[in-house]
Image: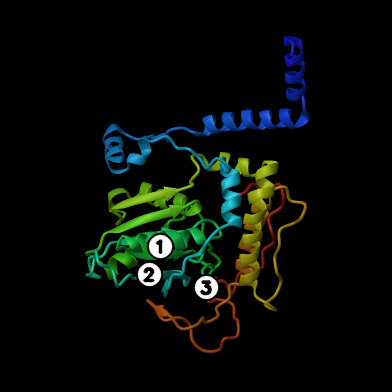
Amino acid sequence: MSLSLLDLWTVRWELVSRVDTVLLCSLTAAFCYLWGRKSQRPLVVCGEKFGDFLQERCPALSEIFRPTPWCWGGRLQTVLCFLIKSRPHVEYRNERIRTADGGQISLDWEDNDGSAAYPQASTRPTVLILPGLTGNSRQSYVLHAVRQAAAHGYRCVVFNNRGFGGEELLTPLTFCAANTSDLELVIQHVKSLYPQAPVFGLGVSLGGMLLLNYLGRKGGQSGLVAGLTVSVPWDAFKSAQSMEAVLNWLLFNKHLTRGLCAAAQEDAGEGGGHRSRPQDSDSNPRRAASANLTSASRRRCLATPRAPSTTATPAPTGSSRRRPCPSCASMPPTTPSPRNTPSR
């Protein structure tokens, strides 16, 4: 029994007009559009000579990037990486160095003494890693970077900012991307330990901004043979404004704010006095956290000995009871900046 042409079109229309069919077609069309939009070649912005060098040494730059079909877009990839991540085991050797203003910086070393490519420690290349805003040597991306560098025979050292990496904040000065004095001290220290070994810099997010500022200021006198930055904004001000968008605020900004608040509260210590926290009504939680972090560090610059480790300058000894550091003992208490005060 044959169907007429009208009957065939009627059956076809009934199939096409079903809700599940419409939904499936819509999802397929959206997937094809996003896949085609995200599949692009990387944009390389540099001089001709350096561009030729990159094309020769990094052939992936000339290939079309195709994201994972079920995970395209930076937001989805960032969230998924946070939820599903591995932490390779790395054994660090900790070292603390002192700054001229009485602060201390924690360095975590992976010496890679078993390196077959570079058996001599004096000439083994060193990779200096700078984590992000609230990061330290225990972050997943840092651990993976250390493992990858060690697999190529390199030595690694992670630069933990003041007050991070399990160290107490001993001075009213914390850190920011515009102040490169601590990074300069760390590089000088690494070069003094291994003067014949080349040093590479790797900065992620805020660490990348710090590294770029340092390279821009020092130029050929930086002490580094190369630098690599990851996830660094082209324009820091526009990036900060973007973080205030509703979706980014919910996914990323609140997480960063919690990390800054945790650092401020850890610095204040249990029973060590007032625990600063950003005002709930402030429209910019990172700005409020920054103000409170600065305020907390000025009121509670605490010096507490840590577990034994290799130190470049001897750490404070004596009682483990918390005490104010000498550099800010005479400072009057400060209060968080008002809401209408611009952040710096």
**Mark 1, residues whose alpha carbon is within 10 Å: few (<14), some, or many (≥20)?**
many
Q: Nearer the viewer, residue 98 or 76?
A: 76
Q: Is residue 259 visible?
A: yes
Disc 1: which residue:
146
Q: Is residue 95 visible?
A: no
How far separated are the C-alphas under marks 3 and 2?
A: 18 Å
Q: Residue at x 73, y 51 (%)?
A: 282
How far separated are the C-alphas under marks 1 and 3?
A: 21 Å
Disc 3: which residue:
167
How far separated are the C-alphas under marks 2 and 1?
A: 8 Å
Q: Position of residue 281 (x, y in %)?
A: 77, 52
Of helix, strand and loop, which one carries label 1? Answer: helix
Q: Position of residue 340 (x, y in %)?
A: 71, 46
Q: Position of residue 37 (x, y in %)?
A: 53, 30
Answer above or below: position of 184 versus 327.
above
Tag nearer the camera, 1 or 3: 1
Q: In this image, 280 relative to 320: left or right?
A: right
Which label number is shown at residue 110? 2
Answer above or below: position of 314 versus 39.
below
- Split into 4 quadrants, where in the image is the N terminus? top right
Q: Residue furthest top?
A: 5
Q: In this image, 52 relative to 309: left or right?
A: left
Of helix, strand and loop, which one carries label 3? Answer: loop
Asked if the residue under mark 1 is in contact with the one under mark 2, i.e. CB atoms within 8 Å, the reply is yes
